[in-house]
Image (spheres, rainbow, N blue to C red):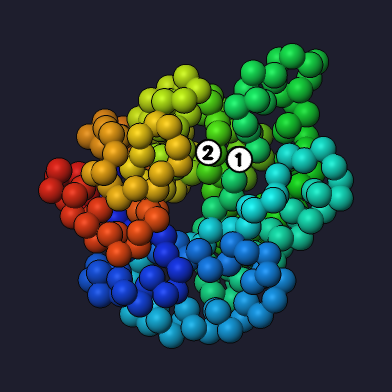
Amino acid sequence: MTDLPILGAAMTLKDVEINRNWLLEMPRDLELQDFVPAEVLAGDWQSVVDEARRLLDGHRGRLGMHGPFMGLNVASADPDIRAVVAKRMDQALDVAAALDVTQIVIHSPYSTWMHNNLDNWPEQRQRVFELTHQTLDAAVKRAEDQGCVFVLENIEDKDPADRRKLIESFNSPALALSIDTGHAAYAFGSTGAPPVDYYVLDAAEQLQHVHLQDADGYADRHWPVGHGNLNWRAIFGRLANISSNPRLIIEIRDKSLIQASAAHLAALGLAQ
């Protein structure tokens, strides 16, 4: 990145209504979060798509969505669960095709427990790869065909290299990395993971999406930027060294403070 990056945000459509002027003032990326629940993906998602098209008339940024994750594990050992996960990914791709979404956020399979046990059984690391491929291979191939990219977000990941190696095993432009700054801060503060900017360093050119939220290293706070203890200068310093142009998405609990979060980073001279 040479110029200051333009910030985007994660919102539901009702949040778009209160932040619409900010969203449209420049080409800000948007991540819609209306399509996470299974009830939506398995129900009348077309009406949500229609409303999104109405509200987003004039939007010039890149459009993404958060994919399904609640109760799902992309590396489940149970074949029936893998089938459900694959079905939800296919439904998410249906929505993406209907709304011209080009990026879908999904969750990493790695947990803190797994980190400490990956080498406790023979070939356990490879087993995670195999199960994830069984779950996602078809979805990743379809995403490739329709010009969409899945980005795999860290949740409990203690070693960022594990997730990077997993997406590299797909060797596909339709699967890349996402970093959630608050999740990485939790892993650093509570499980002994490296600091947040090291996650960016490891991801490098595989990084295509970042959730920006502030936290304290204890829990998944989703506080407004500036309300926690994250080192934003270090994080954006690492981002400045990569050229993959990741979407920088403010993802906070109180959507009325999205613009204040953006203003905080702008005041630091890090983004606009």
Residue 162 locus on image (x, y percent): 59, 27
Asked if 20 appears above or below 246 in the picture, the reply is below
Residue 14 locus on image (x, y percent): 42, 75
Q: Dot 2, how many residues are within 10 Å of its Cα: few (below 14), some (14-19), or many (20+)?
A: many
Q: Dot 1, how many residues are within 10 Å of its Cα: few (below 14), some (14-19), or many (20+)?
A: many
User: Which element carries disc 1, helix, strand or loop?
Assistant: loop
Question: In this image, 175 relative to 12: left or right?
Answer: right
128 or 16: nearer the eye? 16
Question: In this image, 16 relative to 106: left or right?
Answer: left
Residue at 60% x, 27% y is: 112
Question: In this image, 18 relative to 165: left or right?
Answer: left
Q: Mark 2 belongs to which amino acid?
A: Asn
Question: In this image, 40 relative to 194: left or right?
Answer: right
> What is the quadrant of the C terminus in the image?
bottom left
In the rendered image, which residue does mark 1 sit on? Answer: 108
89 or 78: nearer the eye? 78
Q: Residue 154 carries which label?
A: 2
User: Which element carries disc 2, helix, strand or loop?
Assistant: loop
Asked if 90 appears above or below 44 in the picture, the reply is above
21 or 208: nearer the eye? 21
Can the viewer see residue 246 in this picture? no
Q: Are marks 2 and 1 in contact (CB under 8 Å)?
A: yes
